[in-house]
């Protein structure tokens, strides 16, 4: 069986997810969009092998997780374990394990969420049953059992180096005490997902600017890491963020504000047309006003993928023209609704 690529995404964004995947393909295949996931089976086995070797979930914006389905098993109501174990036994020898871990998962759809209790309970039964074949040092592949419903399971494998390290592809973050808004979770998740070396890149004593800062959830994330922050917003900052000694609140227009000296970090959560935001961020980088930025692009209702491409072209063109090297990574985070979150950064230790 040719392995299928299975991508988990936010329900409602399956078309965007498949459109994006299509830009990475070299061959045709069959598509199946579920509720909260996309399945692509290449016509050619070699294309599946290439994707397995070359594609990584970090390259994809709309996919939270990327695994390869190697078997699809219909389940009866009575026996959920037997058919699964037989299917595992019938896998080609190189896929039969040992596996580093086994994860039981479901789509993040309304129907899928109802399977969460089952996946937890049945997960410990399956792990016990497969105990001899599991171990972090034993196998390269992680085994994913993805249940789109109680009637069916996709048996999948993933390379831990090319897939998300979090079950369901969701980095769980806790609401911190004292944060003035739930938006704080978004920046916290962005640092986890988009900036893996955030500890080195966000250091006490650095300076940040927060455009569209009120009531202060993103500013909270920066000051709690010891940064001093210029919080730009006509609206009021709330709670501790209104009186914190590291926060300087300026009631100014985020599109006109310029710092007196270059800063280390720019974050931007203004609700505006995505291309306006992309142009603004590109200007900050091209003029050397910041080295790192996290920003949101609010997506239109239609042609979302095209809009993202336009925004990224705009950034590429401006920074290429300025001769600046940079990294641009984006993801539709768990806490993002009709938007994506991006990290733009200059490699450390290099000056233009
Ligand atoms: C989604 S809220 C930001 C929430 C914030 N990140 C938090 O975590 O609490 C968007 C903010 O952008 C501000 N905003 C919109 N346009 C702006 C502009 N041109 N200049 C400054 N702030 C702006 C709004 O006043 C609003 O407070």
Image (tube, rainbow, N blue to C red):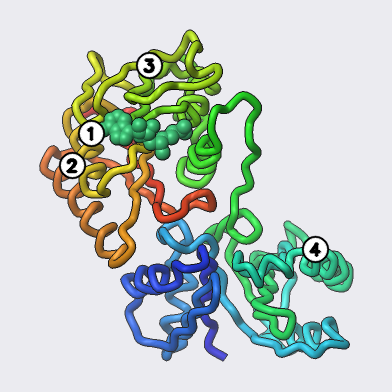
Confirm or deny contact between disc 2 and disc 1 (CB under 8 A).
Answer: yes
The residue located at (25%, 42%) in the rendering is: 277
Depth check, front residue: 227 or 254: 254
Q: For the point 43% across and 75% down, which residue is it?
A: 50
In the current view of this chain or complex, which residue is farthest to the front? 235
| Quadrant placement of the C terminus | top left
Mark 4 / mark 3, whichever is N-terminal: 4
Residue name at image x 73 percent, y 57 percent: 136
- Judge whether 317 appears above or below 77 on screen: above
Q: Nearer the viewer, mark 2 or mark 4?
A: 4
Q: Which residue is mark 3?
A: 249
Instruction: Compare marks 2 and 1 and give the one earlier in the sequence.
Output: 1
Q: CA distance from mark 2 to mark 4?
A: 47 Å
> In the image, is the residue at mark 2 within 8 Å of ligand 1 by its beta carbon?
no
Against 44, is 68 above or below?
Answer: above
Report the Cα–Cα distance between label 2 and label 1: 7 Å
Please name whichever residue, 20 or 305, is drawn nearer the observer in this view of the structure: 305
- Image coordinates for residue 15, horizontal then vertical, percent: 40, 73
Q: CA distance from mark 4 to mark 3?
A: 46 Å
Labels 4 & 1 near each other (Cβ < 8 A)? no
Task: Find residue 319 and name its label.
Answer: 2
Q: Is residue 208 left or right of residue 215?
A: left
Earlier sequence position, callout 2 versus callout 4: 4
For residue 95, side relative to residue 20 (left or right): right
Q: Which residue is mark 1?
A: 285
Any mark on residue 120, and which? 4
């Amino acid at each position: 069986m040719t392995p299928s690529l299975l991508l988990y995404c936010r329900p409602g964004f399956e078309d965007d997810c498949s459109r994006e995947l299509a830009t990475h393909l070299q061959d045709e295949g069959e598509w199946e969009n579920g509720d909260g996931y996309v399945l692509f089976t290449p016509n050619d086995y070699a294309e599946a092998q290439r994707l397995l070797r070359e594609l990584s979930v970090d390259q994809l914006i709309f996919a939270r997780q990327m695994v390869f389905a190697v078997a699809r098993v219909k389940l009866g109501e009575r026996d959920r374990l037997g058919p699964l174990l037989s299917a595992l036994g019938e896998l080609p020898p190189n896929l039969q394990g040992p596996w580093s871990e086994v994860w039981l998962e479901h789509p993040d759809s309304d129907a899928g969420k109802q399977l969460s209790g089952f996946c937890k309970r049945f997960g410990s039964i399956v792990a016990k049953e497969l105990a001899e074949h599991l171990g972090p040092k034993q196998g390269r592949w992680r085994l994913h059992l993805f249940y789109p419903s109680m009637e069916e399971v996709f048996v999948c494998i993933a390379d831990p180096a090319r897939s998300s390290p979090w079950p369901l592809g969701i980095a769980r973050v806790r609401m911190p005490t004292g944060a003035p808004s739930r938006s704080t979770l978004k920046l916290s998740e962005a640092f986890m997902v988009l900036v893996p070396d955030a500890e080195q890149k966000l250091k006490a004593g650095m300076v940040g600017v927060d455009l569209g800062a009120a009531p202060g959830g993103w500013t909270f994330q920066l000051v709690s890491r010891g940064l001093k922050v210029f919080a730009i917003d006509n609206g009021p900052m709330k709670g501790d963020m209104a009186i914190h000694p590291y926060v300087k609140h300026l009631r100014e227009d985020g599109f006109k504000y310029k710092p007196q000296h270059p800063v280390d970090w720019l974050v931007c959560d203004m609700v505006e047309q995505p291309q306006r935001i992309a142009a603004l961020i590109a200007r900050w980088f091209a003029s050397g006003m910041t080295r790192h930025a996290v920003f949101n692009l609010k997506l239109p209702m239609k042609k979302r993928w095209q809009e993202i491409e336009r925004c990224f072209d705009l950034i590429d063109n401006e920074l290429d023209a300025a001769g600046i090297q940079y990294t641009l990574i984006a993801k539709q985070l768990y806490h993002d609704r009709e938007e994506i979150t991006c990290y733009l950064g200059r490699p450390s230790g290099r000056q233009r």
